[in-house]
Amino acid sequence: MLFLIVIYGSDFADRFYSQIQSTFVNIAMVIIMFVLSYFLGLIIYRNYYLEDTARPMFFDTENLEEIAIKGMKQLRVELFGCGLAILLAIGGFGFFC
């Protein structure tokens, strides 16, 4: 299914891009992608990484459960980020090639 979406999506993007292809558009798209990536990374960093990480040395059951829950949330964020990066890479490849 993803393969067909990439094929037909890249065909649509090629028709759109070939009509307006210019150096200015290429530079503008790169700059827009850098700015969007920067702000997305900043939002993720502030929400998930920028916090006090002081923890006790000895863990009890409640503390281990809290750490496990935070770990599962972090895993979901990382998997979502990886999936989004893969989709953006496939879309960019289909759009620029």
Image: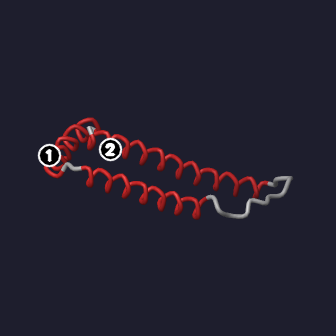
C-alpha distance separating marks 2 and 1: 15 Å
Total number of numbered discs in the rendering: 2
Q: Residue at x 59, y 64 (%)?
A: 46
Amino acid on which the number 2 mark rests in the picture: Gly
Give the residue type at disc 1: Arg
Question: Dot 1, how many residues are within 10 Å of its Cα: few (below 14), some (14-19), or many (20+)?
Answer: few
12 relative position to 64: left or right: left
Q: Residue furthest right?
A: 58
Q: Quadrant of the C terminus?
A: top left
What residue appears at the point 59 percent right and 52 percent down from the top-left corner? 74
Q: Tell me the residue that label 2 is attached to.
A: 92
Residue 15's disc is 1
Q: Secondary structure at mark 2?
A: helix
Q: Are marks 2 and 1 in contact (CB under 8 Å)?
A: no
- 72 or 20: which is nearer to us? 20
35 on left or right of 93? right
Measured from the top left, where is residue 82 in percent x and y?
47, 44
Residue 73, horizontal then vertical, whole percent: 58, 54
Out of 71 and 54, give the one closest to the viewer: 54
Position of 83 with respect to 95 (left or right) is right
Colour convention of the picture: secondary structure
Tell me if residue 35 comes above or below residue 95 in the rendering.
Answer: below
Q: Residue furthest top?
A: 3
Q: State the SS at label 1.
A: helix
In the picture, measured across the screen, residue 37 lies left or right of residue 93, that is right
> In which quadrant is the N terminus drawn?
top left
Residue drawn at x 37%, y 42% is 89
Chain-order first, disc 2 or disc 1: 1
User: What x and y, as percent, mark residue 19?
Assistant: 13, 49
Image position, residue 11 (x, y; %): 17, 41
Within 10 Å of disc 2 (Cα), the crowding (few <14, some 14-19, many 20+) is few
Residue occupying image coordinates x 26% and y 54% = 25
